[in-house]
Image (cartoon, grey):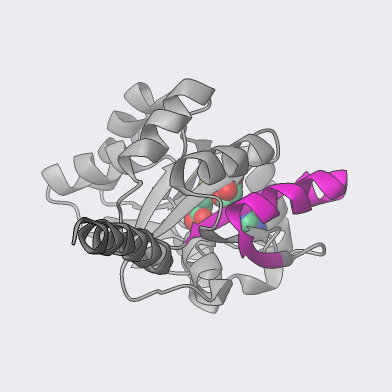
Amino acid sequence: PAMLWIVATPIGNLEDVAARAARVLSEVAVIAAEDTRHSARLSEHLAIGTPMLSLHEHNEAERVPQLIGRLQAGEAVALISDAGTPLISDPGFALVRAARAEGIEVRCVPGACAAVAALSVAGLPSDRFVFEGFLPARAAGRRARLAELADETRTLLFYESSHRIAAAVADIAATLGEQRPVTLCRELTKLHEQSVQLPAEALGQWLAVDANRRRGEFVLVVGGAAVVERHAVEVTLDALLTELLAVTGTK
Ligand code: SAM
């Protein structure tokens, strides 16, 4: 029956693919994939022969109507991305929106998502959090975005690539404070998986020590503004003390 399946795939370790994901991907008429060559590896691993079509930001305008047409003809379609959950910093929004507009049922096969995986191991408050995706690539834009987030009390989640990890951490220290706790999660579920929690400034130094620490894929989990409340209290106490001394001085 006509159905759009949004199927999560692993973020590194192929063992993480859900049994239901494997079944759905083998049963649908076509798999829309961000990069068909990349996803061929997953098909091979699962021994699936389902035809694949590419769907990415550069061909979305033609592909979406094409896939909607097939769904309207009664076919089942699955959407996957290169890693993790589609639509989370990945293509698919235009397809899901169009399917809903046409009254086509959309179902999920949930699974890995790097942001949630990182949050689960970060050791920072996870009851309320804000997913910010990728920070702007250019320094000025990145600092402006971080400045907007300076007073955010919820835990912040950022995706980052190896090219910009050092710059991003330096800007977090400069904008959100040197003492802001940051958990850097690198290569989750992969061979060189590593996660380390340090104050922002110290994390910058940690990254500078070894080029290998700057390789791979990263999630940065940043403590909210309330986590460094102690600093604010100290500042307030200082001000109070100054005032008290001033008052005492005038008597
Ligand atoms: N849709 C994916 C998800 O559900 O997590 C995210 C896709 S986004 C284009 C890719 C970014 O996700 C990477 O640059 C990195 O920030 C993060 N990421 C993906 N896999 C990761 C992993 N194994 N370890 C750490 N971060 C990862």
The quadrant the C terminus occupies is: bottom left
Instruction: Return the residue found at the far front.
Output: 251
- Residue 176 appears anywhere in the view: yes
Q: Residue at x 20, y 60 (%)?
A: 247
At horizontal 51% and vertical 37% (from top left) the residue drawn is 53
- Can you say which quadrant of the picture contains the N terminus? bottom left
Residue 145 vertical placement versus 151 (above, below): above
**Residue 201 lies within the magenta run:** yes
Judge left or right: residue 53 versus residue 43.
left
**Residue in view at x 38 percent, y 57 percent:** 6
Picture quarter containing residue 188?
bottom right
Highlighted range, magenta: 195-222
- Measured as percent of width and height from the top left, residue 139 is found at 53, 24
In-image side of 127 versus 124 (left or right): left
- List x then y, in percent, for residue 2: 26, 56
Which quarter of the figure has residue 126? bottom left
| 79 or 151: nearer the viewer | 151
User: How far across and how far down the image is residue 58, in percent?
Assistant: 45, 22
Residue at 20% across / 56% down in the picture?
Answer: 250
Asked if residue 234 lies in the magenta stretch, the reply is: no
In front: 162, or 98?
Answer: 162
Q: Is residue 43 visible?
A: no
| Front one among 166 and 178 | 178
